[in-house]
Amino acid sequence: MDARDDLLSEDPSALFERADKARKRTHAMLDAIQQAAPTPACLGSQMFLCRAIDVVEAINCFLAGAMTEAGLEAWAERTEMAEEIEYAEDHREAVAEALFQLAHPELNGAITTQRALSIRRGLLK
């Protein structure tokens, strides 16, 4: 069993705890971006990195009941749209696709437990 299998079979309370930490980290990133307003130029070269595990942890938060479908959608949309957030090189395409799937349920379908699990599996490949 590798680390990915461990994550898929992890105790829900541990998933909740890790997901909550990831959610707080991502919200802190987004808050820092917003507080740097009034213009994007104020940020200079400050960029934030969104890793596959960050999206996995947000999905875990949803699966553990700590985030609603609307909350996960809003998180994904804000993360996807923020110009100051780059995607980690090792999973750039997978992160971009996962965020698109989560941020646009009107195009991709509702975020159900099954869809969330499928998107999470795609990120853990």
Image (tube, rainbow, N blue to C red):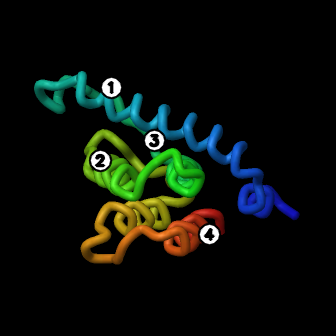
- Residue at 32% across, 61% down: 103
Mark closest to the chain's N terminus, 4 or 1: 1
User: According to the image, label 2 marks what residue?
Assistant: 78
User: According to the image, label 1 marks what residue?
Assistant: 32
In the image, is 125 to the left or to the right of 82? right
Give the amino acid type for the residue marked by disc 3 in the picture: Leu
Query: Crowding near pointer 3: few (<14 within 10 Å), some, many (20+)?
Result: some
Q: Position of residue 27 (x, y in %)?
A: 40, 34
In the image, is 39 to the left or to the right of 92? left
Mark closest to the chain's N terminus, 2 or 3: 3
In the image, is 114 to the left or to the right of 32? right
- Residue at 38% across, 63% down: 102
**Gap between marks 4 and 1, in whole Å?**
30 Å
In the image, is 41 to the left or to the right of 83? left
Q: Position of residue 45 (x, y in %)?
A: 31, 30
User: According to the image, label 3 marks what residue?
Assistant: 49
Above or below: residue 72 compared with residue 20: below
**Gap between marks 1 and 2, in whole Å?**
13 Å
Mark closest to the chain's N terminus, 1 or 2: 1
Q: Quadrant of the C terminus?
A: bottom right
Task: Determine the secondary structure under disc 2.
Answer: helix
**Gap between marks 2 and 3, in whole Å?**
14 Å
Q: Which mark is residue 121?
A: 4
Between 103 and 16, the residue placed more toward the observer is 16
Between 34 and 19, the residue placed more toward the observer is 19
Residue lying at the far left in this picture: please name it. Answer: 38
Please identify the quarter of the rendering in which residue 90 is found.
Answer: bottom right
Give the amino acid type for the residue marked by disc 2 in the picture: Arg
Mark closest to the chain's N terminus, 3 or 1: 1
Q: Which mark is residue 18?
A: none
Q: Position of residue 57 (x, y in %)?
A: 57, 49
